[in-house]
Image (cartoon, rainbow, N blue to C red):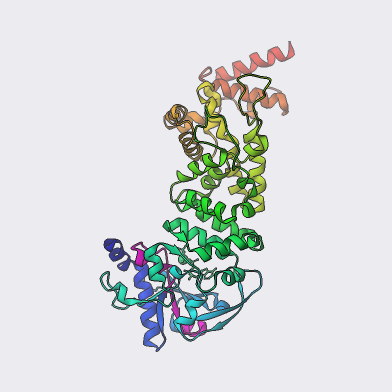
Amino acid sequence: MVENLQSALSSDGFAAALRVVQTLRANDYAAYLVGGCVRDLLLGHAPKDYDVATDAHPEKVQQLFTKTHAVGAHFGVVIVCDETTDAQTEVATFRNDMGYEDGRRPTAVSYADTPEDDVARRDFTINGMMLDPVGLTAQNIDAKVLDFVNGREDLRDGIVRAIGDPAVRFEEDKLRMLRAVRFAARFGFALEEDTYSAIHDNAAKIIQVSRERVRDELTRMLIEGHARKAFEMLDATGLLKEVLPEVAKMKGVEQPPQFHPEGDVWVHTLLVLEKLPAGCSMELGWAALLHDVGKPPTFRAPDPAQPGDRIRFNGHAEVGTTMTRAICNRLRMSNEETEQIALLVANHMRFGDVMEMKPATLKRFFRLPKFDEHLQLHWMDASSAHGDLRLYDYAKDKYENAPAEEIKPALFVSGRDLIDAGLKPGPRFKELLHTIEDAQLEGRITSKEEGLALLRQLTASDTA
Ligand code: ATP
Ligand code: MG
């Protein structure tokens, strides 16, 4: 831990933030590190970025540094770029936030004079500490913290606690409810009792937050490596049924025990989420969450008239794909993201057939964009159910040993050749191309001449 701290303190990001603090102080302003970076340093983690809080107003900050971006200057935020390393430090003027129109963005800010006032507007005690970086070492860090909210104690005890009255703070900004869950999941912390109750009581108000912001929080929960914990807490707090009612419906949906000894659809989904690695793509994260979203609406109990019948979910991948697209659209995901998530959901059951697939079908399966994500999803799915990985091993081995030029070779016979042979584009034309490509993928033809011979043979029977 001290080693991580030491390496954080010798990083470019820290050095840049330190220079910002020193410049501000040389001009008689107060300046400290604040927020997430203080929390992370105290935990011995390397902060992703460094934020500085100061009593200098944004115009002053812009005057004092040569390279700045005034992205949020009306909020009191200026980005300072370090001249040598280009590392960016976010510099925020001490402020009180006043009035929240859309339940998120302050409609007005008033600058505050003291660090104590500034931390009062921040969300959680663990995010509400300041740190003096000048002369900071791994050994003296405790003495360098400014802690007006008892953040250090909560950090030590593993507690996410709202600063001030939680009900008031969540009323001001509903997004904080999702942030509370995300931080608790990320650090393996508990939600403090009153903070938890306030979320529980106000969960239905989360829909007042813009869908993009909700999406970004949920995405972070899926890709930070603690997705299971996050989604268990979303469920426990009542937020899940508000933001993703289709997912909440998985609870209690039974499955056939011979394929799913682990339990119902929700239990299975949580086991899959548990396997999502930190830093995975958002598409894999969302597909892991949604791969069985089509099961609740397709559930069919065993037919008592047919002894030995089992629970079935006929067509769940197709129904789930349609639902997935609707969810992605609702959460304003990009077309590319939606497409890949939908493809992952749509194809997740095809692994069941890989051993029976003709070589041509298998090669076409491998052509799915980012096929490694399909493999990864299948691995998580199978190892969260019956645990039989034979299909996974088979598909992985075939995929890894199939060179790109074998999966998608340059075609011996193209549309051009068909036109030259006097054929017109249309359904039969497409079918011919497909049949000849199959023959090539399966090694039944090995040259253009053989391909053209096959074409003649196929069209001869057309006219016969
Ligand atoms: P991460 O590592 O996820 O970036 P962070 O704590 O740095 O965590 P940010 O979203 O970058 O979180 O915000 C920086 C700081 O600003 C927080 O630590 C917190 O003090 C404050 N903050 C951010 N969002 C809110 C909010 N919605 N309400 C109140 N304070 C907030
Ligand atoms: Mg941050």
How many dots with numbers? Answer: 0
List the single residue furthest toward the top: 464
Camera sees residue 448: no
Judge whether 134 appears above or below 158 on screen. below
Estimate the x, y position of residue 400 in percent, counting from the top left: 42, 32
Q: What residue occupies the far bottom of the structure in this picture?
A: 28
Residue at (53%, 21%) from the top-left corner?
A: 356
Q: Looking at the rendering, in which quadrant would you find the C terminus?
A: top right
Residue 357: quadrant of the picture: top right
Residue 39 lies in the magenta stretch: yes
Is 23 or 442 nearer to us in this picture? 23
Q: Nearer the viewer, residue 276 or 385?
A: 385
The residue at the point 56 percent across, 29 percent down is 256
On the question of residue 295 being in view, the answer is yes
Q: Is residue 200 above or below residue 385?
A: below
Q: Is residue 311 left or right of residue 112?
A: right
* 284 within the magenta span: no
Q: Give the residue drawn at x 44%, y 30%.
A: 389
Where is residue 343 shown, x and y percent of the image?
59, 39
In depth, the one of 342 and 228 nearer the eye is 228
Front residue of 414/124: it is 124
Residue 132, horizontal then vertical, whole percent: 35, 78
Figure quadrant of residue 411: top right
Please state the extent of the stretch shown in magenta in the rendering.
34-63
> In the picture, which quadrant includes the N terminus?
bottom left
The residue at 33%/63% (across/down) is: 44
Decide: is 93 above or below 194.
below
